[in-house]
Image (cartoon, rainbow, N blue to C red):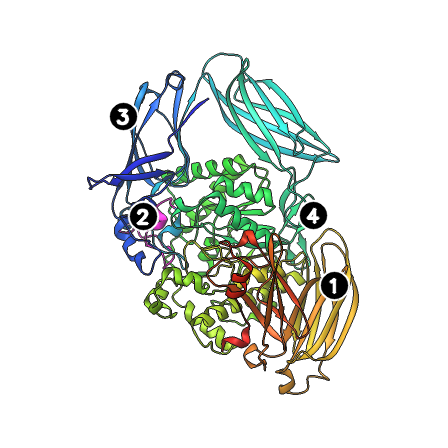
Amino acid sequence: MVSLSLNGIWKMKQTVSSEWIEGKVPGSVFNDLLNAGKIEDPFYRDNEDQAKEIASYDYEYVRDFYVDGELFKQDKIVLCCEGLDTLSEIRINNQKVANTDNMHRTYEFDIKELLKEGMNNIHVILHSPLKFVEQKHKENPLWGVADAIPGYPHLRKAHYMFGWDWGPQIPDSGIWRNISLKGYSCARLEDVYVTQNHTKDKVSLDVRVRHLQWDKANLRIEVRVTSPDGGIVTADAVASGFENHINIDIENPQLWWPNGYGKQPLYKVEAALKKNETILDEKNYNIGLRTLTVRKEKDQWGESFEFNVNGISIFAMGADYIPEDNLLARCNPERTEKLIKDCVEANFNCIRVWGGGIYPEDYFFDFCDKYGLIVWQDLMFACAVYEMNDEFAENIKKEAEDNIRRIRHHACLGLWCGNNEMEWGWVAWDFPKTAKLRTDYIKQFEILLPQVAKETDPNTFYWPASPSSGGGFEDPNNENMGDVHYWDVWHGLKPFTDYRNYYFRFASEFGFQSFPCLKTVESFTLPEDRNIFSYVMEKHQKNGAANGKILYYLSENFKYPKDFDSLLYTSQILQAEAIKYGVEHWRRNRGRCMGAIYWQLNDCWPVASWSSIDSFGRWKALHYFAKKFFAPVLLSACEEGTQVGLYVTNDTLAQVKGKIIWSLRNNRSEIIREGSKEIAVDALNAAICEQLDFSDVLTSKELLRSTYLEYSLIIDNNCISAGTVLFTKAKHFEFIDPEIIVDVGEQADRFIITVQSKTFAKYVELDIKDSDCKFSDNYFDISAGTIKEVEVKKDSLSRNITLDELKEKLTVRSIFNIA
């Protein structure tokens, strides 16, 4: 196979304009216009309002390319388009090749007869997606979410680009993934699929190779497997017919495990189609040796729903992932790797790819393989009604085949899921419903797509929707089976403690909003905009009722903040506490509940949202909390009045032994009562280890408002997990000015910040003015007499900073300081 990349610099313009500007491929219209200074930053202030006009035009991209003799002599030359967004017309040397209408597909076109040896020209016209959906919606209204541009279900384009309740309406276009020519002679590989059979001390690989051949040459298929330590095993066979199977045994295999359970060794599998010693075509994959499926078994509560890896049932811990930018051209491997590493640092072992965005880039899955995150992969259908016809069915069938083939070999892949929230929507939501559209849903998600998944990737579990109890509109948000999206905390204004009323088998979506930090707000506002009810701040708040919800929950839990920055901080504390209530409860009930995936991990632009990491990669309080409540060994407290149960959850493969230490203290941190208990908790288990009752001590409202419980788990002289409990709402607790003292020391690769307090300080936040960084801990509680050490690795700082500068720019506050 001979390849010629067409990536790089093209020319682009509006079709009605005469002015060409530089375009970059892969890339996008908005990004090229922005780089050329033709539009303003669409994320700044209310510039989003200009996006619809920009998106209402058609655009075109052109470039010349040289076809040399080696490529031109190939039997077949294919134009491979890995991503065209979305309505394109392709021309080669002024001759039409094809039209495309699906952003999510890979298109291949045989163009040998259109090419000439020497210089050639390619011309891609991108028609306005905005005009298309507006016209289609007029002709045939299909329901979709209210925050999006109407008509988006008619187009196979990332739904979020049309707006969501956390995202802007910026329907970009472009040649957004690689585009190339591929020349073949004699034959080519059509498909390679690897199946694993695990037995004691051995994994047998069945490598199924399909190839297309258009002459009668004798061909061979050679498969090579390289182990993580460099060992090589090979096998080959005569290429006869369309399909061949080659078997390779891996002795003493190194198994792939999710983060927290083991290592992530990867084996390289290379399949080559050869004529004599000439390689005609080849495909390479990195795979992990593991078994991974979803276990569903009847039990005393209903039916389990849990990831099972190498025979071990995993409590899934993570968040829901959305596209990382509204301008996909700005995404890159470095940005994604940082996000995935941030997940691992917060003890994630799972990530759910939400169905309203894109099928992520190959490198996203490479990083999940490398760092050990199980991927729950939605197909790209979300919160919309789709009308089935022959053309649409064929289009989404090809879409599913393309992406399942591309992704299926990854060790991280945990399941395929048909859609986000549409089964639930048909049962519980109010939108126009007809018998035909209801039947279309069943045809699409319970007949067509599962059949494609079964044929294309039979080794991976398919789930019809999220949430679902298994399909057929049978109580899709059932607490006792399948997965659940729970939103009564937040949308329903229920208190945080309401999470404790439910014992979901797998919570795949639940969340709570917050504002981003002041640094992020400053990136898109002027000083006069910095009020949550200003026009610009409300443009960056896409959930219409959300600001009111934040203020409602704030009024229930905290005193009213004294200024704008304090309000941002308090909103993040609210968010972190809300999610902590749910996760800790479900982890205390490990075995009954086996997954807590919160909404949402990241943002696609600077916005108030449910994310734990904002669009600049800055950790909110929630992500620091997640690092603690997703810890493999967790000590958590369940308080009820003056009683507190202390639970240890052990999500490791070994028994843990240690000591729980607790102390009941007044607001000056003076100890009223204290105790300790030796504990042992078996692997993959949760247990109540201590039940405390302070009814004889906390005998008045005054004492309830001035007393707190501090608890910690000590293993091998190290504090593994810790926390505090208030016996009243934080707004009623009698905090005393903690007069927090910080000092900073320096080591070769990090700064060490020591924090001390004169009284009890809650939600202590550290920050560095004019710089971004990642602290080893933040938003922590501290008692008087305790020294807290926090590390800042120098390579996490956004710029070089000296010790003296850090001392000058380091800021600290706690909940006491906000009112």
Dot 2 amino acid type: Leu
The numbered mark, 1 or 4, whose residue comes first in the sequence reads 4
Dot 3 amino acid type: Asn
In the rendered structure, are the residues bearing label 4 and label 2 in contact, judged by CB atoms less than 8 Å apart? no
Label 2 – label 1 distance at C-alpha: 54 Å
Q: Can residue 482 be seen by looking at this rendering?
A: no
Q: Residues within 10 Å of mark 3 (few under 14, many from 20)?
A: some
In the rendered structure, are the residues bearing label 2 and label 3 in contact, judged by CB atoms less than 8 Å apart? no
Which residue corresponds to mark 4? 312
Figure quadrant of residue 302: bottom right
Label 3 – label 4 distance at C-alpha: 57 Å
Which residue corresponds to mark 2? 34
The numbered mark, 4 or 2, whose residue comes first in the sequence reads 2
Q: Which residues are magenta?
A: 136-157
Which residue corresponds to mark 1? 714
* Foreground label between 3 and 1: 1
Q: Residues within 10 Å of mark 2 (few under 14, many from 20)?
A: some
Q: Residues within 10 Å of mark 1 (few under 14, many from 20)?
A: some
Label 2 – label 3 distance at C-alpha: 29 Å
Label 1 – label 4 distance at C-alpha: 26 Å
* Residue ID at (47%, 65%): 514
Q: Position of residue 580 (x, y in %)?
A: 59, 65
Residue 734 included in the magenta stretch of the image: no
Residue 93 shows which numbered tag?
3
